């Protein structure tokens, strides 16, 4: 591993500019930081620095530009050395050692030192250009960790909108059954149902969800190279199903992607619901009930007291009298 070597004067400012290349098999979020300095005599100096950006999201094969403004400690002599490290937390913490040598004790003219460097993650051995032993061999694990890290930068509304749509999809399928249809018939006659529909309507809930879904779908198509109805959540499903035939404990592990089952058909439920607020709330609450036994028990208690009026018997139509037997005008 190459050591980052820097020369500067004591109490000076070091500007470290890093171009970070991401060769991990999945997009990743990083939060770089610098360890405290350790002198040759064991003295620890607090690392006084600022980093820009504090977080960075990098696609596979992409790069990020990081800038560190480092204020060096006072009182060091010429020839003293400080040892630290640049850390890049991602699927694991990648550490790049820093060796800083003091070339002047009293800087008079030059108080700012620039240093540029390119680094790559995962770390590659200089001998065989192969990833070092600490690199994760399981593609599925890396994808999961990258997905977890992505929550640092992905707006929560994209994930929330997909979860809501998944609940609506489940509720829609349940409503097509006899049991679900009866439950919805009872539920729709409650004050709870009316309040929910009014809130959905007043908060422009449908428009908010549709906009978030459109953005999420577009990003999913862009990052994965093809359109998937499962959107972002399908990436998590793929990780889960790819654990079926994988032996990640084997030293000869080789990732093998399985054929993924048919993704969720969100297109159908979106077309059925369209802009109908009642349908959105109906399928959403029914879906929540199927996902959560606790919510389902509350809904069951709610609809138990609902009385469905019996349909009135149709009155028989009055038979018209024959025209010739009517008195007066024959106008009807």
Image: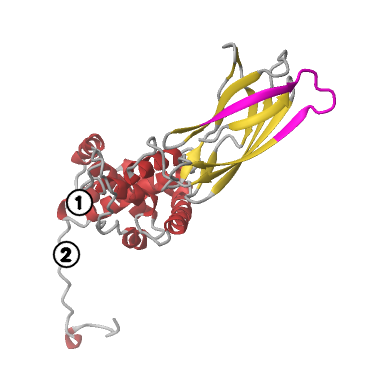
Does any portion of residue 282 appear in the rendered image? no
How was the colour assigned to the protein in this rendering?
secondary structure
Say whether residue 143 is left or right of residue 34: left
Residue 278 horizontal/vertical position (percent): 35, 53
Distance from disc 1 to disc 2, alpha carbons, whole Å, reads: 28 Å
Q: Which mark is residue 180?
A: 1
What quarter of the picture does the C terminus occupy?
Answer: bottom left
- In the rendered image, which quarter is residue 268 located in? bottom left
Which mark is first along the chain, 2 or 1?
1
Of the pair 297 and 232, the residue shown nearer to us: 232
Image point 44% across, 38% down: which residue?
149
User: For mark 1, does the 10 Å Cα neighbourhood hold few (<14), some (14 to 19), or many (20 or more) residues?
Assistant: some
Q: Which segment is the magenta one?
A: 96-114
- In the rendered image, which quarter is residue 150 located in? top left
Disc 2 target residue: 314
Q: Is residue 228 shown in magenta?
A: no
Image point 26% across, 56% down: which residue?
260
Q: Is residue 106 shown in magenta?
A: yes
Q: Which mark is residue 216?
A: none
Residue 306 horizontal/vertical position (percent): 21, 43
User: For mark 2, does the 10 Å Cα neighbourhood hold few (<14), some (14 to 19), or many (20 or more) residues?
Assistant: few
Q: In the orientation shown, which residue stands out farthest toward the bottom?
A: 324
Residue 61 horizontal/vertical position (percent): 49, 51
Say whether residue 200 is left or right of residue 82: left
The mark closer to the camera, 1 or 2, is 1
The answer to whether 162 is drawn above or below residue 94 in the figure is: below
Image point 69% across, 19% down: which residue?
79
Residue 296 horizontal/vertical position (percent): 23, 39
């Amino acid at each position: 591993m190459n050591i980052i070597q820097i020369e500067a004067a004591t109490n000076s400012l070091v500007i470290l500019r890093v171009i970070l290349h991401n060769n991990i098999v999945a997009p990743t979020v990083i939060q770089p930081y610098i360890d405290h300095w350790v002198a040759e005599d064991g003295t620890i100096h607090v690392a006084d620095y600022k980093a820009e950006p504090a977080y960075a999201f990098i696609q596979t094969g992409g790069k990020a530009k990081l800038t560190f403004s480092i204020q060096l400690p006072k009182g060091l002599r010429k020839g003293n050395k400080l040892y630290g490290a640049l850390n890049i937390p991602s699927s694991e913490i990648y550490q790049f050692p820093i060796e800083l040598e003091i070339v002047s004790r009293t800087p008079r003219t030059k108080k700012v030192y620039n240093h540029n460097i390119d680094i790559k993650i995962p770390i590659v051995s200089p001998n065989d250009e192969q990833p070092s032993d600490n690199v994760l061999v399981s593609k599925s694990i890396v994808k999961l960790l990258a997905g977890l890290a992505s929550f640092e930068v992905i707006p929560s509304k994209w994930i929330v909108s997909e979860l809501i749509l998944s609940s609506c999809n489940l509720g829609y399928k349940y409503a097509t059954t006899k049991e679900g249809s009866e439950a919805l018939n009872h539920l729709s006659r409650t004050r709870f149902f009316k309040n929910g529909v009014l809130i959905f309507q007043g908060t422009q809930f449908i428009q908010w969800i549709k906009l978030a879904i459109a953005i999420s779908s577009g990003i999913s198509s862009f990052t994965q190279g093809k359109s998937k109805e499962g959107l972002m959540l399908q990436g998590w499903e793929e990780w889960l199903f790819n654990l079926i035939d994988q032996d990640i404990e084997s030293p000869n592990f080789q990732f093998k992607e399985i054929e993924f089952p048919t993704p969720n058909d969100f297109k159908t439920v979106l077309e059925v619901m369209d802009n109908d607020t009642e349908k959105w709330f109906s399928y959403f609450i029914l879906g929540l009930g199927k996902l959560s036994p606790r919510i389902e028990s509350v809904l069951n208690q709610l609809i138990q007291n609902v009385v469905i009026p019996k349909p009135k018997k149709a009155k028989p139509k009055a038979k018209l009298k024959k025209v010739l037997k009517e008195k007066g005008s024959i106008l009807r």
